[in-house]
Amino acid sequence: MSVLHGKAALITGGSKGTGLGIAKAYVKEGIAVTITGRAADALAAAKADLEQLVPGAQVLTLVADNKDPDVPARVVAGTVERFGRLDILINNAQEFRTGKALQDITEDDMTATFASGFFATWRYMTAAYPHLKSTEGAVINMASGAGVQAVPNHGAYGPNKEAIRGLTRIAAKEWGTDNITVNAINPYVTSAESERYEREYPEVIADIVKGIALGRIGDAERHVGSLCVYLAKPEGKYMTGSTFDVDGGAFIRP
């Protein structure tokens, strides 16, 4: 039995892509999971997928739009009410508004990006803090190489993700005395969105893959999910304030 069996995790944006991959890795460890998303049908499909993968898996689904400032406290409270505890917070949900030059980004683009990303991450973290302090838990925030590498046409998304990394480092220092670890991951793995994009623009994806040192796009469960498992285990609890690049060498940095 996994040392994580019986723990509880909250995964925002857990109905698809990276979030669902993490949820799959977690239920295999016996972790109860809350997954959020904006579409009830996608959440229902994800719940069925998880329960088929691990019969008896404990899965709570909550429809949530992270741009609503009242949502994080409600979702955290619902998770604790259902599972009696909260050990792991995964901030993954994010509106993805890219493809515009800086001068073409609208006020709505910038507001929606930061509201669903940075501000939601901060709100979830502060709502979860008392529970994570009690369980000496872990926070894992999704950042992006688009921010670290200042990728053009990501003028809202990139700075937002860098703000999340900054928040991660400060929380790691402030919460270290509570034995709460706080880390960030820069993932580049397949998702329903990336697969749709590949079908529509195969030449773009082919060019992207050429820039990946390993020559392939990663798998959400195998590569990101497994790291999230490790960071929640005792073996991973001496790393905090770090950013982990899970991108096959797409963005190799000092």
Image (cartoon, rainbow, N blue to C red):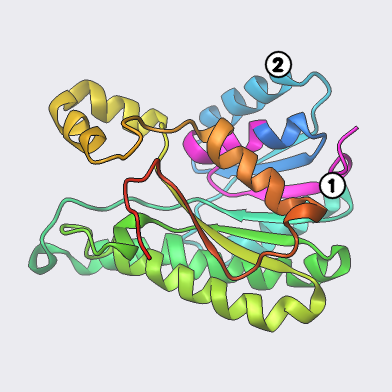
For residue 172, say whether it is visible.
yes
Q: As drawn, is 231 to the left or to the right of 134?
A: left
Residue at 67% in and 64% down: 239
Three-letter amino acid code at disc 1?
Lys
Which of the numbered marks, if any, corresponds to residue 81?
none
Judge whether residue 245 is colored magenta: no
The residue wearing badge 1 is 7
Q: Is residue 15 visible from the viewing direction of this image?
A: no
Q: From what the image shows, is residue 37 above or below residue 121?
A: above
Magenta part of the chain: 1-24
| Residue 21 falls inside the magenta stretch | yes
Q: Is residue 180 above or below residue 21?
A: below
- From the viewer's perspective, tell me whether residue 81 is left or right of residue 193: right
Q: Where, by quadrant of the figure, is residue 176 drawn?
A: bottom right
Q: Quadrant of residue 229?
A: top right
Tell me the quarter of the image containing the N terminus. Answer: top right
Residue 52's disc is 2
